[in-house]
Image (cartoon, rainbow, N blue to C red):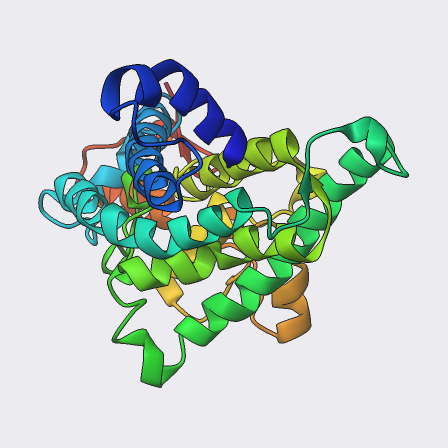
Amino acid sequence: MDVVLDYADHYILTPYVYPSTWPEKDPWRQIASLLLIANIGGYILYFISATFSYFFIFDHRLMKHPQILDNQIRKEIMCTVISVPFMSIPTVTMFFLEVRGYSKLYDNVGDTRLGYAGVVLSMFTFIAFTDMCIYWIHRFLHHKLVYKHLHKLHHKWKVPTPFASHAFHPLDGFLQSLPYHVYPFLFPLHKVTYLGLFLFVNVWTVSIHDGDFRVPETLKPIVNGSAHHMDHHLFYNYNYGQFFTLWDRIGGSFKYPSSFDGCGPIDLILSKEKENGRLKPEHIKNGKKRD
């Protein structure tokens, strides 16, 4: 995060925001700057990725599902807008420790033993590590003593839209992001690679709420996509994973997505429209509405 902070200081904060008497390396200034970056950056990333997903990827037929709430998108957005500032406080604590040099983040690839091979390897180990940790954190959040206090808010969205991707209780949202912050304190990671991975996981979080259930046939047994996560919202106790199905299979919580079996939320909508006479049989092919 010090890379982002350096750019923000150089181009915006030092010349236009802070007095010249407040040094860039002052800890309180760094904390204030990181709070600004986390909040403004969080909102920008959320609104750009969720809005793009909603208009260009999300299957809008899902808005006809009987479990869609009145004004649900507005409620999802408001939940996120309220939660982000509170989520940013513990998040900035981790960023501050990184900026002060307590993590294993590094600048120069050439100074490392594995070089660029190490950078590529770290991408895979980052995804594997965070997938494992998020599975167990997510499953913990479903414990009966915890669920109603933290995670229940996110399950308010039975049929989520991309705008539900960050609509969490603040502590819930931070706990599920914690593995992303912990990794660079345990393992070496290139700073720019870390930023790229941080963007990726935020976009991925939007993607598993996007209502687009298409997955290449060869990846269906491996990747935890939108169809898997939709069933998690609908049935609660299945598919806790973030990226892959591995830990759900190990933990006995894997559920083959109902949408892959032709009995998912889109199929329910099509069935009801057919019953009501608004959709003729010839408009249905393989569980999907034909154009």
Q: How many marks?
A: 0
- In the visual, does 207 lie left or right of 278? right
Residue at left offset 32%, top offset 75%: 147
Whether residue 259 is visible to the viewer of this picture, yes or no, is: no
- In the visual, does 227 lie left or right of 209? right
Residue at left offset 37%, top offset 45%: 267
Residue ranking furthest to the front: 21
- In the visual, does 74 lie left or right of 241? left
In the figure, residue 163 lies in which quadrant?
top left
* Whole-percent x, y for residue 93 in the image: 41, 54
* Whole-percent x, y for residue 74 in the image: 13, 40
Q: Quadrant of the C terminus?
A: top left
Q: Nearer the viewer, residue 12 or 64?
A: 12
Residue at left offset 32%, top offset 67%: 151
In the figure, residue 246 lies in which quadrant?
bottom right
Taking 50 as reference, is 67 above or below it? below
Taking 207 as reference, is 126 above or below it? below
Whether residue 230 is visible to the viewer of this picture, yes or no, is: yes
Residue ranking furthest to the right: 113
Residue at left offset 84%, top offset 36%: 112
Taking 199 as reference, is 95 above or below it? below
Q: Nearer the viewer, residue 97 or 228?
A: 97
* Whole-percent x, y for residue 150 in the image: 29, 69
* Whole-percent x, y for residue 257 in the image: 51, 54
Residue ranking furthest to the bottom: 145
